[in-house]
Amino acid sequence: MITSRLVAAGFAAGLVLVAARAGAQPAPPAKHDDTAFDVMNVLSDQGLHDLKEESWNAYGQFTYISSFKVPFHAPYTNANGSPNSFNGDYERSFTGTFTLFFGLKVWRGGEIYFSPEVLTERALSDLHGLGGATENFELQKTGSTAPSIYRSRFYLHQTFDLGGHDVVVDSDPLKLGTTIASRRLTLTVGNFSAIDVFDKNNVTWDPRQTFFDEAFMTHASYDFPADARGYTFGAAAELYWDDWVVRLGRFLPPKNPNQQSIDFRFWERYGDSLEIEHDHTINGLAGAVRVLGYRNHVLSGRFDQAIAAYQTNPLENAGDCPTTGYNYHSGNFAAPDLCWVRQVNVKYGVGINLEQYVAKDVGLFLRLMYSDGVSEVDAFDSADRDLSFGAVAKGSLWHRPFDVAGIGFATSWISDAHAKYLAMGGIDQFIGDGNLRKAAENMIEPFYSVNFGKAVWLAADYQLVWNPGYNADRVGPIHIVGAKVHGEF
């Protein structure tokens, strides 16, 4: 029995390596409480592994997402040589990911986690033209159709018990099964993603099982430090005190905005995050409130300074950026560009994250964040403010307990300085049509995920987006239809 189930799990993994062409954007680890091809549970059933007090564990996942965009009309695209418009033609994008998760207990309270990952992708419009509503949360800035393998996470997690009552931690990816105290201090140090620790939400939980769009993965305007894949090096401390949690982290930014190389001068360039969480119950149903603030001290360009530089000297334009410096390669000689004004700047933001279950397996969520919008995006999305909300339900209501369904609305918008810069023809990493009539970028997304044999889900998704790149001149609307296959073992 054990042999056949292990062979089945290995065969599924092999199929993915050969055919699924994988990759990943940082995302909270998957939940495995309803997994069939689960090696840990198989070993436990045979008396070969203790899920309640693990010394090691190993899990894996594969996900393939394909999205199709219907053509839409716009009065102009990439005006005057600005290259960042969302393409109006028919397009197809895809991502494939294959991830392994390994955990090892090294001493009392000390755990090491390692996660290699494989990625292949093709983005709509080369990942240009959308501010906060990127169609697929797995997309990365360095991805290509050629599969690439890399280390996504390698870190130490240390727990110090401070008393209180016992809390059972279930065996999961990036979690060893054990029992800990409700009052504790944890430290996470190494290579991981800021959103492995901050801005989690138990209603939307793992986007590999819920929404496709990046707008629902975290705050669209949470410019957390990361390399072009979404991971970085850093340290985070979390103080749990019964129903309260305080989190503080410092993470390293890229050497240049949105690039792969990390700047390791943590005393000079860094991003700090602080989050306060309170967990509660209403009529016996779980909920939580999280308030998150961040402050980045990184190399970036301010929009007002780029505009002033161009107005003072028209030769300091987008088309004439020095080839020896870092720039976004615009061909617009009549537009300002951030390449002329990059220096160490401060960027900050504050947001709230709400979740509340209103019935068994039915939850509501809401996120809202304000970022200052003074300087360019350093590592995430071209959004300065964002709002998202919606509902997610498991199929227990209709006798399909492992199915998942949801609907969400997301909107993001930009500061006046950011809008003026874009209206003059400037671009940032993701957006810039050569002109702009400012509007909020909005999207609606319903999805349904059907479970097969507990370990595999097949999902259908629809996204309606209007005002891409915050431009009412190119309102759309844009129709994106997607499909996803996701498996866990």
Image (cartoon, rainbow, N blue to C red):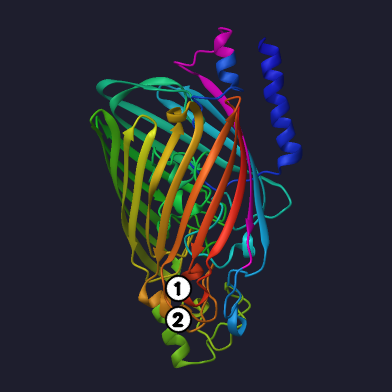
- Residue type marked 2: Ala
Marks 2/1 in contact by CB < 8 Å: the verdict is yes
Quarter of the image where the N terminus is located: top right
Q: Can residue 259 be seen in this snapshot?
A: no
Horizontal and vertical percent position of residue 56: 53, 21
Give above or below for 294 relative to 21: below
Residue span colored magenta = 43-71
- At a point 51% along the width and 59% down the height, the residue shown is 464
The residue identified by callout 1 is 301
Task: Residue 330: give x, y in percent of width and height.
Answer: 60, 78
**Dot 2: few (<14), some (14–19), or many (≥20) neighbours within 10 Å?**
many
Q: Is residue 55 magenta?
A: yes
* Res 175 visible: yes
Numbered badge on residue 220:
none
> What is the x, y in percent for residue 123?
63, 58
Q: In which quarter of the image is the C terminus?
A: top right
